[in-house]
Amino acid sequence: MNDTAHALSSAGTLWELLTRRAALTPDRPVLFQDDRSLSFGELHARAERAAAGLYGMGVRPGTVVAWQLPTRIETAVLSFALARLGAVQSPVIPFHRDREVGFALRESKAEYFAVPGRWRGFDHTEMGHRLGAKGLFEAYDRLPDGDPGVLPAPPADGTSVRWIYWTSGTTSDPKGVLHTDRSLIAGGSCLAHALRPTPADVGSIAFPYAHIGGPDYMVMLLLYGFPAVMFEKFALPDALADYRARGVTIAGGSTAFYSMFLTEQRKTPGTKVIPTLRLLAGGGAPKPPEVYHAVVRELGVQLTHGYGMTEVPMITMGDPDDGPELLATTEGRPPEGMEIRIVDGEVRLRGEAVCRGYLDPAQTAEAFDEEGFLRTGDLGHLTAGRHLVLTGRLKDVIIRKGENISAKEIEDLLAAHPAVGDVAVIGLPDAERGERVCAVVEQPAGAGELTLEAVTAYLRAEGLSVHKLPEQLEVVDALPRNDTLRKVLKYKLRERYAAGATRER
């Protein structure tokens, strides 16, 4: 981290961080979207005016404001306006509907709710009325406005809870994750330190800004003073024109995004799909080693992958200087201040970037051990050089005839099969074995028929132990994914195939 970024990372609050950056480089752009741009100075000024407008509506320090808005310049301005006031923000992914949104509004006790109105064919305002949301207002292309002279002093304490993020609910309700300005700054600093961007770089925000990755990425822009392109609707190949026009040098999001870029590159082998691109970076989902090698080989760029979660936005990150083997097989190293402890194979964490717990005190008590380490539920180990290797999830271990089987080990091997585009390996209930191994495969365009026999023969040839071989194969048009970082929703696959056929070995 350079000296300027290091000094900025000591800011007590997100508003202080923006204020410092705006003073340093007021005219430098921070956000691009379509034909619009916003400088650091303009972001600061517009956020202050929006804060004054919110203040006139009754928003005060500590007021809980939920917002369900797409990835737009206005969304970033509104979020910083709330940070200026010291309000408590509860971002909600814009694709969520009544059940998830109603739960978030009730549990957070939101006093205001900002929505985009009708967006992508859905009326969010009507949903807000239906749910009885308090303080409902639209904030798509117009924000509250006022004279900053009415504002009280900005918050000085960055360790108070001012953010409620929501974990992705599976078969149960999501959890409200409590963050502070300082925990978000710490997470973004980790990302920035690992990627080492320069003012000449141009990034991209292709995921929902309401995701924990929104402020994570924004902190990096503020620390290093470079801009990013925002995509309200991300789809390839449509987005490529903006990547090329803005000269994007850093892109990514998660493993699914890497695969999408590879798909586009394979349409024009030998010609870089984004000429200026030098780095793909992301996290939030497992990265098979073959994906790393394919990106480097075919896209001609570096790939650094990291490990994070809603509770801890950035835990480790690959360093471009780590070398191919470490970048392909590990999640990188933790930054200074992040403690990683392995207990019975489980990764546990302690540090400034770790959340303060959950809205439900019982969930908080269950999540932290007696020494204050967060139980992640992820399995892994540390190398001699302190690089983290993830081997699966506690809930993603398949127990077949009393033997533990890592789903990730099988997935990593199958990811290199030419007839496999993406794969999820799950355990399904089985009366004789306890659980049976099922591979659910999404094939690339033009791939030939894939059979269970071909899959098991391939895995045998790769050296996989016989007791780990899949007993069931399902081929699907598309794996079910969430709407944020495109993670595969394995619980949906378990529900779908729990009564499926078994095959003896």
Image (cartoon, rainbow, N blue to C red):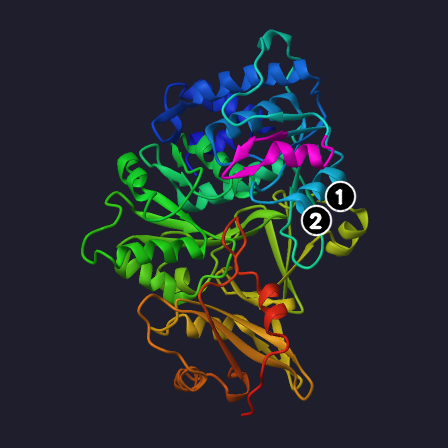
Mark 1 Cα-neighbour bin, 10 Å: few <14, some 14–19, many ≥20 = some
- Name the residue carrying label 2: 175
Name the residue furthest left.
270
Q: Which residue is drawn at 37% across and 25% down?
A: 36
Q: Is residue 124 magenta?
A: yes
Vertical position of residue 334 compared to residue 122: above or below? below
Looking at the picture, how far across and down is residue 39, in whole percent? 40, 22
Looking at the picture, how far across and down is residue 395, in whole percent? 65, 67
Upstream in sequence: badge 2 or badge 1? 2
Looking at the picture, how far across and down is residue 450, in whole percent? 39, 79
Vertical position of residue 465 compared to residue 228: above or below? below
Q: Quadrant of the N terminus?
A: top left
Asked which secondary structure carries label 1, the reply is loop
Q: Which mark is drawn over residue 489?
A: none
Which of the pair 498/398 is nearer the observer?
498
Q: Which mark is drawn over residue 359?
A: 1
Q: What residue type is labelled 2?
A: Lys
Q: Which residue is drawn at 54% across and 46% down?
A: 336
Vertical position of residue 207 compared to residue 76: above or below? below
Vertical position of residue 310 compared to residue 220: above or below? below
Which of the pair 376/37 is nearer the observer?
37
In the visual, does 463 lie left or right of 495?
left
The answer to whether residue 145 is visible is yes
Name the residue furthest right.
362
Which of the pair 13/321 is nearer the observer?
13
Looking at the picture, how far across and down is residue 85, in whole percent? 64, 21
Mark 2 Cα-neighbour bin, 10 Å: few <14, some 14–19, many ≥20 = many
Which range of residues does the magenta coloring cover? Answer: 114-133
Asked which secondary structure carries label 2, the reply is loop
Q: Does the magenta stretch include residue 66?
A: no
**CA–CA distance between discs 2 and 1?**
7 Å
